[in-house]
Image: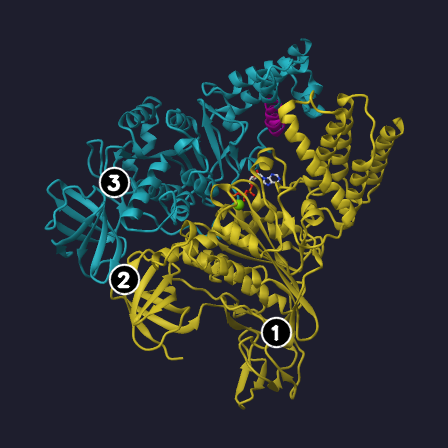
Chain colours: A yellow, B cyan
């Protein structure tokens, strides 16, 4: 690559206009140079001899005439062992290392190695001289936390590659060549454990994409039973401020039944991601007995960090997810909030003076959102194994109104919609997913029959509630009133879930099926009451017993005893008849 | 010295352009007009055309006025001598006292590395039960008061400033009416807090652009003091005026508005200020309490809406009271577990009963008959409003919790409160149980 230079001729916010000669590439990285500071930037538009570049840092103090050094490389991340447990900014700068070197504040123009150059990894080779491999094939593996981290042929290498030599099993750093291959033109390449990949290009090195059907268990009852997510699928969580988007993602990141979780804190509060950063290393992953951090990567580009890096952060996170998917793992990417990412695009588009669309978002907003969620998927790899990347994004609609461009564009492409409602969060009915407005195109592990009965009661209950607001309790028939009580009961003991109780916060699939079956039988049974007061008291009592039951360890003695108490209570009412 | 230019190419809104070379982005310049000197800040550079926002406004700027570039971005002094002093939005004293130019620091500095943040855990007591008991304020929190004009939000802010257990107060006024400013100042003085306060005051009669600097000035100074171990409370009123100033500049610069005229980066602009709230490990902390007036009492208006997405909760001030519903301190659970063992129970229990009271109120107003239970709730609601919600109530947390028990005991039997029996045994007032 020939390295070009250019000269700044205009500055507006984080956008530079740069004059250059020769060849440059769209999305190429360049550095604006001022003194001994080099500010990372990306070419986002080329027009004649002018390039428009977004700077990933504050542009304070830059001057017209300052030099720009182009690199010829697209904005990329490093892929290799050691990504797990890391905390990066949107450009893969490791934040704890930055803090160690520079203290409290994020220094401008400092770039550190995303992966340790000194750490040794124990390599077990999987190829031998003479083997023919292609991009994405496994050359060997190293243990990384509890996983087999496969060392792969770099994704950018084309054609058949013949293995010339392989290093012996042993400890290597990421920069040491471990395999030498010869390409179709006869050229030799020494391959290491690490390579780079441009974040904005999807990794699609697989035999085929498969329709996602296997549920991704989040252990949130309202999600798994009513609005499930599939491994390799996509979903979104729109909701007004304070409705519980972040808390919902936080508990999902803890309890979801997947191999790897990537958390992208995109333009939101620093304090929130700090909770995860500080708590995860101390929390035990019940699946493995290891710390939760061992399956986690955090990308933190919070709201006061540079906005261009915020735009990049979502792509960085996705690329890391795609990388682990290539190892046959189930990866979950949680992005909070995709609206902040969309706003970063809007800021940029404004500076480029592009023709604005609705609410000043760029015309390509929809296609960018679609491209992002398209990177999710369940795929069949070269070796017949499957890997998945599931993407869940929160959306922060202006004014809490879902009729806005980001929510609408997202709803067109995702497989499930978990809409949070202000009424539910005000009433502290958490998680505040609206049970009637939300939807999912995926199948639940819970028998369909139980779900549809429950849904039916929720709808009827909402109707009765509406009516009662007008005519009061006195004007409502006892039958309707009981329907309402039943739907409220279902809401209280199943839809609502206490995120802060160690047992209730995560309900496993068997338990969900077991409990919803019990609830469905209550809903269906003909209960006889002398009057409304008696009905109300019965359901209050039943609700209390069910909630207590929710707090008991699955299949413990107390759990079984409580179940009997509940059954006796119900039987009492049905036999009265 | 720095180059001086005296050809102003264009004047539009409060933005002027000049031809100049070797100018840094966001650099400061001084423009001398017939009305006097004003600072101006570079907001755009295109080849040799430099756009500047003029703090004193463009009124009276002539095409031959002198523009002198200062070679540095906006700075502010940082010194103990600033305590008790009042400055304007350019950092110039407005109290007639001497200029302070020691220790100049840059404003709007880099953000804190998230890896250096810690989980906040210290309560800031205000002696206002609606805050201390129901929505505790936490050191390093950023919290706005959502209100409408006419409500006593500045009085509330001043009172919190006086009573909060902090080392120092930095007050930033943006577009404050002159008498509000004087009242605020006098309250701090009368309460003996002026000598631990620094005030940056931009009033409604000052040029709009000058108000834009106020949050950054306050927060830059606060940050330095916090790094020296000080517990700093920053008060910003009114951030809606700040947002409106941003809007004005954006429109002058012909930026495409995103929502009701506000620029698309309103969220980032507000966030970069509010996110300065921090608890520095091992030293001090910055807590931000702001006022956001809601135009048309509409919380979906872009300013309160974007603010709500940034801050850690909000207090709604309505009819002179902090509303128990809608108001939320998102950090309260970090501090209300260890304050006193009945804190959470009183917080939840009293609010639930108050919600029931509001329901019976509705029933009553619709003419439905009141049951004995409704009567109890009615009594409770009135006592809760006068004993807890009224802003004149001024008691420490512990006393407020005791008062909570006493109100409950005046209205209900223990088992009617839904509170855990062990707590009732420990805290239920003896005497009143009889009635
Ligand atoms: N599942 C839950 N259980 C209990 N409380 C909850 C739950 N979810 C949210 N909350 C309460 O609501 C508050 C706000 O939740 P959260 O931060 O998740 O909102 P959000 O939708 O992410 O808001 P924003 O858009 O402003 O980031 C929390 O601080 C907590 O008090
Ligand atoms: Mg959130």
Q: Position of residue A34 (x, y in %)?
A: 30, 64
In the structure shown, which secondary structural element does the residue marked by tag 1 occupy?
Answer: strand
Name the dominant secondary structure of the magenta segment.
helix
Q: Quadrant of residue B97?
A: top left
Asked if the residue at tag 1 contacts the one at tag 3, i.e. Cβ–Cβ closer than 8 Å, the answer is no
- Quadrant hosting ligand 1: top right
Q: Quadrant of residue B341?
A: top right
Asked whether mark 3 lies closer than 8 Å to ligand 1, one says no
Distance CA(mark 3)–CA(mark 1):
58 Å
Q: Position of residue A200 (x, y in %)?
A: 49, 66
Q: Position of residue A294 (x, y in %)?
A: 63, 58
Q: Nearer the viewer, residue A27 or A45?
A: A45
Q: Which mark is residue A151?
A: 1
Looking at the rendering, the stretch of residues picked out in magenta corresponds to B342-355
Labels in figure, total:
3
Quarter of the picture holding the N terminus of chain A: bottom left
Name the residue at 40% across, 38% down: B230
Q: Farthest residue in the top direction?
A: B435
Residue B345 in magenta stretch: yes
């Amino acid at each position: 690559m020939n390295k070009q230079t250019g000269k700044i001729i205009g500055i507006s916010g984080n956008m530079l206009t740069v004059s250059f000669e020769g060849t440059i590439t769209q999305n190429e990285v360049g550095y604006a140079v001022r003194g001994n500071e080099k500010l990372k930037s990306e070419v986002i538009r080329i027009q004649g001899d002018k390039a428009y570049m977004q700077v990933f840092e504050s542009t304070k103090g830059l001057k017209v005439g300052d030099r720009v050094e182009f690199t010829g490389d697209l904005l990329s991340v490093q892929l290799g062992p050691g990504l797990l447990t890391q905390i990066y900014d949107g450009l893969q700068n490791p934040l704890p290392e930055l803090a160690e070197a520079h203290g409290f504040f994020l220094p401008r123009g400092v770039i550190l190695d995303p992966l340790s150059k000194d750490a040794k990894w124990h390599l077990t080779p999987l190829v031998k001289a003479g083997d023919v491999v292609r991009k994405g094939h496994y050359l060997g593996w190293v243990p990384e936390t509890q996983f087999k981290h496969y060392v792969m042929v770099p994704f950018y290498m084309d054609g058949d590659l013949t293995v010339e030599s392989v290093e012996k099993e042993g400890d290597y750093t990421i920069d040491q060549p471990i395999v030498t291959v010869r390409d179709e033109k006869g050229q030799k390449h020494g391959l290491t454990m690490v390579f780079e990949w441009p974040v904005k290009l999807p990794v699609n090195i697989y035999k085929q994409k498969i329709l996602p059907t296997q549920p991704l268990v989040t252990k949130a009852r309202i999600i798994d039973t009513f609005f499930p997510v599939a491994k390799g699928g996509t979903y979104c969580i729109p909701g007004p401020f304070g409705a519980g988007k972040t808390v919902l993602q936080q508990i999902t990141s803890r309890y979801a039944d997947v191999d790897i979780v990537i958390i992208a804190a995109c333009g939101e509060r620093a304090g929130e991601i700090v909770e995860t950063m500080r708590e995860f290393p101390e929390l035990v992953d019940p699946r493995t007995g290891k710390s939760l951090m061992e399956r986690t990567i955090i990308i933190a580009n919070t709201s006061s960090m540079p906005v261009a890096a915020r735009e990049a952060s979502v792509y960085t996170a996705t690329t890391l997810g795609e990388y682990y998917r290539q190892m046959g793992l189930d990866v979950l990417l949680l992005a909070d909030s995709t609206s902040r990412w969309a706003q970063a695009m809007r800021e940029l588009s404004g500076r480029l003076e592009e023709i604005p669309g609705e609410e000043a978002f760029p015309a390509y907003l929809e296609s960018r959102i679609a491209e992002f969620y398209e990177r999710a998927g369940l795929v069949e790899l070269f070796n017949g194994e499957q890997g998945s990347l599931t993407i869940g994004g929160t959306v922060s609609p202006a004014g809490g109104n879902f009729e806005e461009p980001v929510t609408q564009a997202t709803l067109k492409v995702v497989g499930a919609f978990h809409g949070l409602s202000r009424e539910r969060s005000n009433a502290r009915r958490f998680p505040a997913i609206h049970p009637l407005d939300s939807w999912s195109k995926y199948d639940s592990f819970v028998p369909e029959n139980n779900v549809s009965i429950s849904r039916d009661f929720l709808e009827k209950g909402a109707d009765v509630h509406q009516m009662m607001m007008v005519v009061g309790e006195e004007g409502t028939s006892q039958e309707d009133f009981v329907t309402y009580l039943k739907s409220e009961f279902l809401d209280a003991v199943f839809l609502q879930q206490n995120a802060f109780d160690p047992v209730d916060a995560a309900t496993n699939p068997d338990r969900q099926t077991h409990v919803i079956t019990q609830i469905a039988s209550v809903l269906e049974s003909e209960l006889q009451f002398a009057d409304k007061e008696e009905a109300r008291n019965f359901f209050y009592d039943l609700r209390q017993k069910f909630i207590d039951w929710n707090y008991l360890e699955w299949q413990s003695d107390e759990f079984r005893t409580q179940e009997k108490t509940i059954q006796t209570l119900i039987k009492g009412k049905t036999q009265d008849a | 010295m720095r180059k001086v230019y005296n050809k102003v190419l264009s004047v539009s809104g409060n933005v002027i352009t000049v031809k100049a070379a070797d100018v840094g982005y966001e650099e400061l310049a001084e423009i001398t007009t017939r009305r006097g000197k004003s600072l101006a800040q570079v907001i755009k550079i295109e080849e040799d055309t430099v756009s500047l926002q003029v703090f004193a406004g463009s009124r009276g700027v002539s095409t031959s006025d002198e523009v002198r570039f200062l070679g540095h971005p906006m700075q502010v002094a940082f010194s103990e001598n600033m305590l008790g002093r009042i400055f304007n939005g350019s950092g110039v004293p407005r109290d007639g006292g001497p200029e302070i130019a020691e220790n100049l620091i840059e404003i709007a500095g880099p953000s804190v590395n998230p890896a250096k943040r810690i989980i906040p855990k210290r309560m800031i007591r205000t002696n206002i039960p609606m805050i201390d008991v129901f929505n505790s304020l936490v050191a390093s929190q950023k919290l706005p008061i959502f209100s409408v004009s006419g409500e006593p939000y500045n009085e509330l802010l001043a009172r919190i400033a006086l009573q909060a257990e902090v080392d120092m107060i930095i007050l930033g006024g943006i577009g404050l009416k002159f008498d509000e400013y004087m009242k605020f100042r006098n309250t701090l003085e009368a309460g003996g807090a002026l000598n631990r306060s620094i005030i940056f005051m931009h009033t409604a009669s000052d040029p709009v652009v000058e108000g834009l600097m106020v949050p950054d000035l306050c927060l830059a100074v606060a940050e330095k003091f916090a790094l020296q171990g000080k517990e700093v409370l920053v008060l910003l009123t009114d951030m809606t005026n700040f947002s409106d100033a941003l809007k004005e500049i954006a429109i002058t610069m012909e930026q495409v508005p995103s929502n009701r005229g506000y620029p698309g980066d309103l969220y980032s602009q507000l966030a970069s200020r509010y996110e300065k709230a921090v608890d520095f490990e091992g030293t001090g902390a910055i807590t931000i309490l702001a006022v956001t007036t809601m135009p048309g009492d509409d919380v979906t208006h872009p300013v309160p809406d974007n603010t709500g997405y940034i801050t850690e909760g909000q207090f709604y001030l309505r009819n002179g009271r902090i509303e128990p519903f809608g108001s939320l301190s998102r950090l309260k659970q970090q501090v209300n577990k260890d304050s006193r063992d009945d804190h959470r129970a009183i917080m939840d229990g009293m609010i639930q009963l108050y919600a029931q009271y509001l329901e019976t109120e509705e029933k009553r107003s619709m003419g439905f008959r009141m049951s004995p239970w409704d009567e109890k709730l009615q009594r409770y609601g009135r006592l809760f409003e006068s004993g807890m919600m009224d802003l004149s109530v001024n008691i420490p947390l512990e006393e407020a919790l005791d008062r909570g028990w006493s109100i409950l005991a005046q209205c209900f039997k223990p088992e009617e409160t839904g509170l855990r029996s062990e707590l009732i045994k420990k805290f239920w007032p003896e005497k009143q149980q009889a009635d």
